[in-house]
Amino acid sequence: MSIKELLTADRVIINVETKDWEEAVRSAGRLLVDTGVVEERYIEGMINTTKELGAYIVIAPGLAIPHSRPEDGVIEPCMAVVTLDPPISFGHTDNDPVQVLIAFGAVDNKGHVEALSQMATILSDKENFQALMKAKTKKEVLDIMWSSSCMWNGTGKQPDLENPDGESDQATRHYCRC
């Protein structure tokens, strides 16, 4: 599955103010619950996983990827993006504070691999990651997360970012960086 299939406009929220890392994770989890792709218990699963295993979810300076096991309530594969303002400490020595959370849910250990690969490609580009941290609108987040990956399957048609929930008929450049 591609990022566009997992990340929809109603799963993006910008400049969230939270008191701590748990509240930040709850914000991302709430987007997944409210859109019907995970059960409520998935939020606690993400928090408990982080408490048990530590701040390993903070994978790069400023970036955390909270998640839990499929059996913790994933209904369908999904992704949510939350930007924090101000950034929050997760207790990671090298990569705190966190400004961007990308939460995901997988129904098995294979279906989300394509999207995670695309996400790695997108976020390994410093300009993309800096733009994501500075994003002021959902449109900007979706532009970065959607247009920098190969989700158009070679059609050359970019999603209509003015109407992120619909498809555009306008042929545009294919921004694939694979």
Image: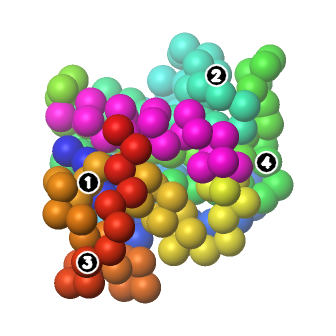
Q: Are marks 2 and 3 in contact (CB under 8 Å)?
A: no
The quadrant in which the C terminus is found is: top left
* Disc marking residue 55: 2
- When the figure is inspected, residue 144 is found, relative to residue 43, above or below; the finding is below
Q: How is the image coloured?
A: rainbow
Which residue is disc 3 drawn over?
A: 171
Label 3 element class: loop
Residue at left offset 41%, top offset 78%: 161
Q: Is residue 146 left or right of residue 136?
A: left
Mark closest to the chain's N terminus, 2 or 4 = 2
Which residue is disc 1 drawn over?
A: 151
Mark nearer the viewer, 1 or 4: 1
Which residues, given as a range, are shown in magenta?
111-130
Label 1 element class: loop
Mark nearer the viewer, 4 or 3: 3
Can you give x and y, in whole percent of width and height, for residue 116 in the image?
36, 35
Q: CA distance from mark 4 to mark 3?
A: 38 Å
Badge 4 density bin: few <14, some 14–19, many ≥20, Cα 10 Å: many
Q: Residue furthest top?
A: 53
Q: Are marks 1 and 2 in contact (CB under 8 Å)?
A: no
Q: Give whichever of 41, 46 is nearer the camera.
A: 46
Q: Are marks 1 and 4 in contact (CB under 8 Å)?
A: no
- When the figure is inspected, residue 149 is found, relative to residue 157, above or below; the finding is above
Which residue is disc 4 drawn over?
A: 87
Badge 1 density bin: few <14, some 14–19, many ≥20, Cα 10 Å: many
Mark closest to the chain's N terminus, 4 or 3 = 4
